[in-house]
Image (cartoon, rainbow, N blue to C red):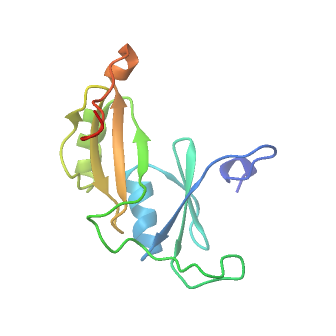
């Protein structure tokens, strides 16, 4: 294993995303085989390098000394999200086609939102993943404000 494969900066910082997963091998396969990430470490924790970032995955569990009042668990309500991965791609139609063929289940096909083309899918634990391609925003055209915010 090479140091540059790990999320371990020699100076400054970098951003990773931690996912609490129910089944590490299942999630590892999704992020590597469907989304094309590189498995850096298979377990304890599972680390997958995805594009220019890393996903760190472990099963849930109860409090630990460094987070004494926190229990980790995968999402339990697919209708509610408090955060999600946002993946930016150069060709959303190609991405949608290729990932669908590999088993990804998108909520809708890509939809034109003025600023971008966008669609969402879920990982095996139900985490929401936005996939977007900048279009209008490159020309100064942005999405409408959220409903009720004028």
Percent x, y for residue 63?
A: 61, 84
Q: Nearer the viewer, residue 82 or 127?
A: 82
Q: Residue at the spot x=71%, y=76% of the render?
A: 66
Query: What is the quadrant of the N terminus in the image?
Result: bottom right
Tell me if 124 is positioned left or right of 74 in this view: left
Total tally of numbered discs in the picture: 0
Q: Residue at the spot x=31%, y=39% of the render?
A: 95
Percent x, y for residue 100?
A: 24, 49
Query: What is the quadrant of the C terminus in the image?
Result: top left
Above-or-below relation of 142 to 25:
above
Tell me if 68 is positioned left or right of 95 in this view: right
Q: Residue at the spot x=41%, y=54% of the render?
A: 84
Above-or-below relation of 119 to 93:
below
Q: Nearer the viewer, residue 37 or 12?
A: 12
Above-or-below relation of 127 to 130:
below
Percent x, y for residue 134?
A: 36, 27
The quarter holding residue 62 reads: bottom right
Tell me if 62 is positioned left or right of 37 in this view: right
Q: Which residue lies furthest to the bottom in this view?
A: 62
Percent x, y for residue 15?
A: 62, 49
Q: Which residue lies furthest to the top in this view?
A: 139
Q: Which of 82 and 149 is in front in this view?
A: 149
């Amino acid at each position: 294993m090479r140091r540059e494969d790990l999320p371990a900066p020699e100076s400054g910082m970098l951003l990773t995303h931690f996912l609490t997963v129910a089944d590490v091998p299942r999630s590892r396969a999704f992020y590597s085989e469907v989304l094309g990430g590189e498995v850096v470490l298979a377990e304890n924790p599972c680390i997958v390098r995805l594009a220019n970032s890393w996903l760190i995955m472990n099963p849930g569990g109860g409090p630990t000394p460094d987070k004494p009042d926190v229990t980790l668990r995968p999402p339990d309500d697919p209708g509610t999200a408090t955060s999600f991965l946002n993946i930016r791609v150069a060709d959303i139609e190609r991405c949608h086609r290729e990932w669908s063929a590999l088993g990804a289940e998108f909520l809708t096909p890509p939809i034109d939102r003025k600023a971008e083309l966008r669609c969402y899918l879920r990982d095996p634990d139900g985490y929401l993943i936005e996939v977007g391609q900048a279009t209008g925003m490159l020309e100064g055209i942005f999405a409408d404000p959220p409903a009720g915010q004028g």
